[in-house]
Image (cartoon, coloured by chain):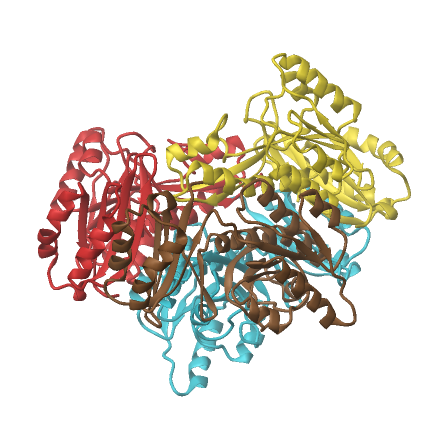
Chain colours: A red, B yellow, C brown, D cyan
Amino acid sequence: MERVFRLVMSCPDNVGIVAKVSQFIAQHQGSILEANHHTEKADNWFFMRNEITASSLPFSLAQFTQEFTPLAKELSMQWHISDSDVANRVILMCSKQSHCLTDILNRWHSGDLKCDIPCVISNHDDFRELVQWYGIPFYHVPMTEDKQAHFDKVAQIIDQHNADTIVLARYMQILPASVCEKYHGRIINIHHSFLPSFAGAKPYHQAHKRGVKLIGATCHYVTKDLDAGPIIDQDVIRISHRTEPDDMVRLGKDVEKMVLARGLHMHIESRIIVHGNKTIILD
Amino acid sequence: MERVFRLVMSCPDNVGIVAKVSQFIAQHQGSILEANHHTEKADNWFFMRNEITASSLPFSLAQFTQEFTPLAKELSMQWHISDSDVANRVILMCSKQSHCLTDILNRWHSGDLKCDIPCVISNHDDFRELVQWYGIPFYHVPMTEDKQAHFDKVAQIIDQHNADTIVLARYMQILPASVCEKYHGRIINIHHSFLPSFAGAKPYHQAHKRGVKLIGATCHYVTKDLDAGPIIDQDVIRISHRTEPDDMVRLGKDVEKMVLARGLHMHIESRIIVHGNKTIILD
Amino acid sequence: MERVFRLVMSCPDNVGIVAKVSQFIAQHQGSILEANHHTEKADNWFFMRNEITASSLPFSLAQFTQEFTPLAKELSMQWHISDSDVANRVILMCSKQSHCLTDILNRWHSGDLKCDIPCVISNHDDFRELVQWYGIPFYHVPMTEDKQAHFDKVAQIIDQHNADTIVLARYMQILPASVCEKYHGRIINIHHSFLPSFAGAKPYHQAHKRGVKLIGATCHYVTKDLDAGPIIDQDVIRISHRTEPDDMVRLGKDVEKMVLARGLHMHIESRIIVHGNKTIILD
Amino acid sequence: MERVFRLVMSCPDNVGIVAKVSQFIAQHQGSILEANHHTEKADNWFFMRNEITASSLPFSLAQFTQEFTPLAKELSMQWHISDSDVANRVILMCSKQSHCLTDILNRWHSGDLKCDIPCVISNHDDFRELVQWYGIPFYHVPMTEDKQAHFDKVAQIIDQHNADTIVLARYMQILPASVCEKYHGRIINIHHSFLPSFAGAKPYHQAHKRGVKLIGATCHYVTKDLDAGPIIDQDVIRISHRTEPDDMVRLGKDVEKMVLARGLHMHIESRIIVHGNKTIILD
């Protein structure tokens, strides 16, 4: 894959934004590989993502930032630019189920998920060797009666590894509000229901009780409100009256791991903008 | 399609039920075209549906009933048998949207939906001519301030036409509890959300507000609790941040009409057993 | 829906195309509602579609064309612009199956498909009254031994009604090469298989024979090579060993009508560019 | 999961088969957990699968076989019975891609795929340590110019490990006809296209060339005719004009591993009967 710069921005909508931004890129001979726009009509807000071939530009990311800042100010932008050669640092957190963990590790190992995984943190020790097989440090932070102590230790490991992103790969614990706020828009959870149905505990059992004919999974950014953050991706599979909760647990794993992987992939490529409690996904 | 008898039963589970029922059928030279079983483990209840070639049996439906009753009593069955040559009488109720109505009419007209449609009832007069083109009586029963009068009139038309089944093809009115109870397990509604999410009014607007990435539709039996009856079928389609509520209304129509048609098809072929607040679908 | 101009273009890829085009639009105060780009890497070709609010521009479509032509020439563009208020004229052709026909007519009648339908042409007279109920002229052109005479008559009706687009809504006849060429990129067919599998006659029977577990439908532009033109859209549904060819015919209708409607919708909104034997769909 | 016997049979269709078989089970107090029938109309052939709680029967599998044989002969059955406590021995064969391999290993390790994996055979040494982490022997059998020698070695390992089933988890080599015949109905392959489209080499490149809008994967039993054996399961995902062959390779992996896992799951639970060049799947 060619090295690219990803320029992601949002600002109040107006005539001429695309012209100005693309003019800026063109005057520096920037070659646009991919471009996506969106205007949110409800609040007249504009979103844009450009992938620009890095080698086509005469300057570094730092220089780009310096040169682009005046225009960004003129248009009242929120914006950032990232370099595909600087990998997103993704910490994985898991518990006693391995389907999401091994799925992400395999995608990363085979080169399909282009990020760094500085470490895996778990409240159980089960997958230490599996994770270490991939050459990744594994931290076992047991959950104790002193929950605060557990989360302090977790927060310290996250900080120490300089995480860009935290993935709750079926971590099954509710993070403290302080962590949610510190990593706002950077903690990705997979919930095993089609939200907003069946938030909270034991969603497959809730689904079984209601008698639904499809079950699903939802990948979302974590906020301090349980299972209520901005939704990134969702999917469902068909079940029937014969599907017992245990079968749902088994079958649901496939949806969970696929939806989480798709969401993480979008996140790593800087394709997601959180806007209010929604996501704009520029793909 | 060959004429078949459809024997549908449920009873407490026990060793030997299938043996006894299939022995009964075999001793009368009945040729089983299709058979489906299910055991609900939670309450140890057994369900079975057999399609038997009518011409292979030496007796009529009435005689079958007489002969089978002792065995049904022995096994404490709830059961019924129906004849594919006696069409289910399906009354359609609609309002100002035609997608479900015309979809069902076209399936019926082309022979894909094997039922009778004794009449269409609507609180608006818009589709009178379209319905009459199909040779089906159309009743316009305007909604007035006196809701009771409206529903009395509707109930009278339903009775007069001897309905087996009532389909709320986007009827948009809440039927009185008395009608729901009288036609328990025989009123089919299509709700334009993936229940239990977004019950009640304006589900697409609710979905837009929550920022979900899939929208759906749910076909269910009507009970006196709004949008809470036994679910028959559901499906979803993918949307994005670009999908405005108006687009959802347009795109959702396709899911609504497909899900309603599938549910009605199952119902007409006596494939659905309501069990508690769930459906067992023997297909 | 707001009135928009749809500017659709393709040209050799180069630095600065987006800048120049969006600069052109911005300098005339054009408000871009939606923009999509694509670069085909295989032959370094660039594609773009812009939806511009008509009322934001100071000129008519004719003036736009005049003003834009120098830039289009400079960039060696193939391009066209259309006005959402000038409806595409879509002639429907059908035979003895009505599912696609009534589905399109209902979408059109309810305002979900924004086009004109100047007439319906069929080699059978079955749907005359149904079509006329919608206020649309119906032409019955029987197929005779003299195929040439049939197609001459068809071609004459098409010309007389000044068709922009011809939809073969299960027309079941192979159009002569001369018609295919005259309306290149403007004749849309629905084939009842997942192409390239099962081209030609009786695809469901071919599918049954091979024992596939999904059946599908393909919407494509017609070329002189049977079922080999550029694919617009496809979809599938799950079947099983129990699905007989007759069931496939019935179940497949749902996929056929959905896929055809989606393809036609894209076509009418000028979202499809034919490039070689493929389609670029800017949505 | 309760221990069950799986009785799978097929025979010429006739009145009374279900009665006789279920009577046999009932007279021994067998409790049927699940039962599925199918009649293939084309050749009037009957198929049935019963899951019977092992503890409800008074005898072992060997005794069941002895007692059941007279009835099986009377009805001219092909049949077998298996014990859920006797694990199917599944040998995995892979090459240089790990997505199917690790997916199956993780399902097996987490208890979702109830089989034994006596060994993994590969023509490359890449995944030796990963496989060994799971405690499974790994055989590296390089492909040499002497293909016969390679396959002789492979065949010897398969025999030595007493395989019930061989899974080609993206093995990428064509097995010799002798192996295909010896393990008829027991070698499962995953092909990365929606067969019968794009059989043979580089199906994603073929798909890209044709411009299809969905790509798929097919799980099938291997016969001596390349990619032409009985299809077990298939699925597809949506792509667009933007999806380059490399993206297809990445995205397709998800479909490949899901479809292969579903097919293997059905196979292990004795749910699949090969009939001619098709599969009857009793689930």
Up-down: is B91 above or below D112? above
The answer to whether residue B270 is left or right of residue D225 is: right
As rendered, which of B206 and A174 lies closer to the eye? Answer: B206
> From this viewpoint, is residue C277 visible?
yes
Quarter occupied by residue D101:
bottom left
The residue that appears at 78% across and 68% down in the rendered structure is C144
The residue that appears at 14% across and 48% down in the rendered structure is A71
Image quarter where the N terminus of chain A lies is bottom left
Estimate the x, y position of residue B217 in percent, counting from the top left: 53, 37
As rendered, which of B280 and C100 lies closer to the eye? Answer: C100
As rendered, which of A66 and B196 lies closer to the eye? Answer: A66
The residue at the far bottom in this view is D146
The residue that appears at 48% across and 63% down in the rendered structure is D90
Up-down: is D163 above or below A119? below
Estimate the x, y position of residue D283 in percent, counting from the top left: 60, 50
Quarter occupied by residue B265:
top right
Estimate the x, y position of residue B20 in percent, counting from the top left: 77, 40
The residue at the far right in this view is B58
Instruction: Give the number of callouts.
Output: 0
As rendered, which of C128 and B135 lies closer to the eye? Answer: C128
The answer to whether residue C186 is left or right of residue D153 is: right
> From this viewpoint, is residue B15 visible?
no
The answer to whether residue D57 is left or right of residue D154 is: right
Estimate the x, y position of residue D211 in percent, counting from the top left: 46, 66
